Image (cartoon, grey):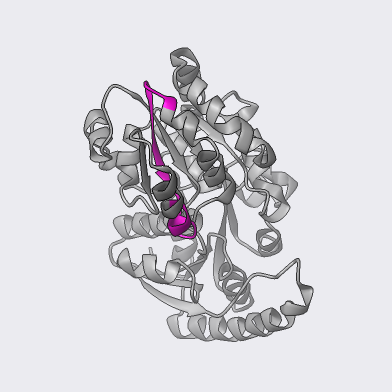
Amino acid sequence: MNNTPRVIVSGGGTGGHIFPAISIANAIRAKRPEAEILFVGALGRMEMQRVPQAGYEIKGLPVEGFDRKRMWRNAAVLWKLWKSRRMARAIIRDFKPDVAIGVGGYASGPTLDEATRMGVRTLIQEQNSYAGVTNKILAKRADKICVAYDGMERFFPQERIIFTGNPVRQNLLEAAPEKADAVRAFGLIPGKRTVLIVGGSLGARTVNESVLGNLPLVRQQTKVQFIWQTGKYYSEEIRAELDRRGKPDNLFTADFISDMAAAYAAADLVISRAGAGSISEFCLLGKPTILIPSPNVAEDHQTKNALALVQKDAALYVRDDEARELLLPLAINTVQDVERLAILSENILLLAKPDAASDIADEALKLADLND
């Protein structure tokens, strides 16, 4: 056994990558308190703030994603990629990791690629049902590939695939309050059916417009109430609109909900984008869910994530271009259908992998221990 395993965890960009990464790091630290863990993220992205808050050191790379619409801007992107690779090489040389873990996001590409070139054992975690371009490239030389969906041998060498599921935030179960207390925490009324609406930490325009366009319908509900995370990009615009039109009494709004354990505990039904991390949380909690996949993601992977659940009657699905008309009426009808909610909850719970972070940590530590 490696007495002091040294681990790099790379990736981020959104909460969907950051929270699983932190969960894996926490699981490693729980198993091996002496482990040295260093994060590598992208400068200016969310991980540069959230990772230190979780108690870990992080180094930032200037890497950015390619602009598929304005190709002329990619000259600067390529230069930043080249610079990021040099910086990643220096970080790896100085830190001397025994294993590098990639969780997706801009920084994981140059970091994991340089790690393999320098002889460091690597593990990648593919969250989605449709593998991204970066992970498909990295997988050619990765030692282990942890996945959350069936059929991933379409993208990766089958002999290196390990079915672990996706890690989720540990406090969702540990810190969950009683439902009535959770509902009161949002200024709402226990006993009424509650719909939680989230578009990710940054927000989702279509989801937000689906609510704003149906405010009269929201206001009419006497048995249904709503918790709405608008996202920081849209919060001022929505606040001004609600001030102008009047916010319904049965609607709680916030740009960001820090206590998601309470939000989930309060909810009878969740409306969400179809990011892999969010879906894993709904599975773990057995939450009936309506998914609105974002059309603005690589390879349309959110639609594939959603359909993987819909095919097992474990979630409902509304297309992004139909959401403004269909989403709120469907949510109001569904949240009052107790039998339908029970079926959705039972089926999505069957897909949960509660030990994902621990299992991935075990695989990473096995690779690290090979350096003894």
Residue 353 seen in this snapshot: no
Image point (56%, 47%), residue name: 275
Any magenta on residue 57?
Answer: no
Magenta stretch: give its range. Answer: 220-238
All told, the count of numbered labels is 0
User: In the orientation shown, which residue stands out farthest toward the right?
Assistant: 71
Q: Nearer the viewer, residue 14 or 95?
A: 14
308 over 190 or under it: above or below: below
Q: Give the residue displayed 32% in from the left and 23% down from the top.
A: 192
- Quadrant including the N terminus: bottom left
Between 223 and 266, the one nearer to me in the picture? 223
Q: Which x, y percent locates residue 260?
A: 35, 45
Locate the C terminus by quadrant: bottom left
In the rendered image, the vertical position of residue 302 relative to residue 225, given as above or below: below
Point 70% across, 62% down: residue:
140
Front position in the image: 365 or 131: 131
Point 60% across, 39% down: residue = 292
Q: Say left or right for 169 vs 43.
A: left
Q: Is residue 334 above or below residue 365?
A: above
Image location of residue 129, percent across then percent down:
64, 44
**Residue 97 appears left or right of 125:** left
* In front of the other: 41 or 302: 302
Q: Is residue 232 magenta?
A: yes
Q: Is residue 33 above or below residue 205?
A: below
User: Is residue 1 something that shows in the picture?
Assistant: yes
Q: Position of residue 234 (x, y in %)?
A: 49, 56
